[in-house]
Image: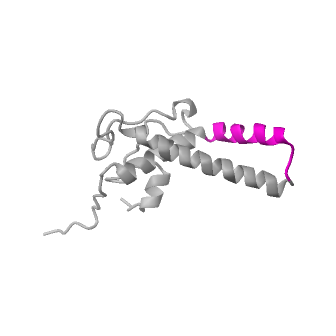
Amino acid sequence: MQQKSRLLAILTYKCPRCRQGDLFTYQFFDAPLKFDKMNKQCPHCGIRFEKEPGFFFGAMFISYAINVALLLVIGFALYFLFDDPALWVYIVTVPTLVVLLLPFIFRISRTLYLYWLGDIRYDNPYSKKVN
């Protein structure tokens, strides 16, 4: 069993405690329309992900911040790389990219929220002393 870094575990949507179990029921490319189905507990270590009803409501604010950053990056990229195209290009491009990236933004915002505010500490199996 290989130890995963925190960043790799976040990017692959793994449990914050064991960094082995999947947070989401389906892999994204296996069932793209079921991107929001999340495991109730870790299939590897058994810890509950949702501490209380509505726990992931706060992930909405992370999602909002990611969407604002995405909007700014797309807007500046269009302005500087394509020499300020017509208004309709902004109106079509920005919402299209936000909708296409919605599954990724949903998953990463929940994962970040769980890692930052879930009060779950990494249980490193390599740091345990053997008697």
Quick one: 46 or 50, which is closer to the camera?
50
The answer to which image quadrant residue 93 occupies is: top right
Where is residue 27 shown, x and y percent of the image?
50, 40
Position of 96 compared to 29: left or right? Answer: right
Quick one: 62 or 1, which is closer to the camera?
62
46 w.r.t. 78: above or below: above
**Residue occupying image coordinates x 39% and y 61%:** 2
Where is residue 102 shown, x and y percent of the image?
59, 39
Q: How many numbered marks are there?
A: 0
Quick one: 77 or 42, which is closer to the camera?
77
**Residue occupying image coordinates x 85% and y 51%:** 84
Quarter in which the C terminus is drawn: bottom left
106 w.r.t. 121: above or below: above
Residue range highlighted in magenta = 84-101
**Residue occupying image coordinates x 68% and y 51%:** 72
Seen as rendered, the residue at the extreme top is 33
Position of 85 compared to 105: left or right? Answer: right
Q: How is the image coloured?
A: one colour
The answer to which image quadrant residue 101 occupies is: top right
Residue 20 visible in the picture:
no
Where is residue 95 shown, x and y percent of the image?
69, 37
Quick one: 42 or 121, which is closer to the camera?
121
Position of 23 compared to 41: left or right? Answer: right
Seen as rendered, the residue at the extreme left is 131
Q: Main secondary structure of the magenta part?
A: helix
Residue 109 visible in the picture:
yes
**Residue occupying image coordinates x 77% and y 38%:** 91
Quarter in which the N terminus is drawn: bottom left
Where is residue 96 shown, x and y percent of the image?
71, 37
Q: Is-magenta flag for residue 99? A: yes
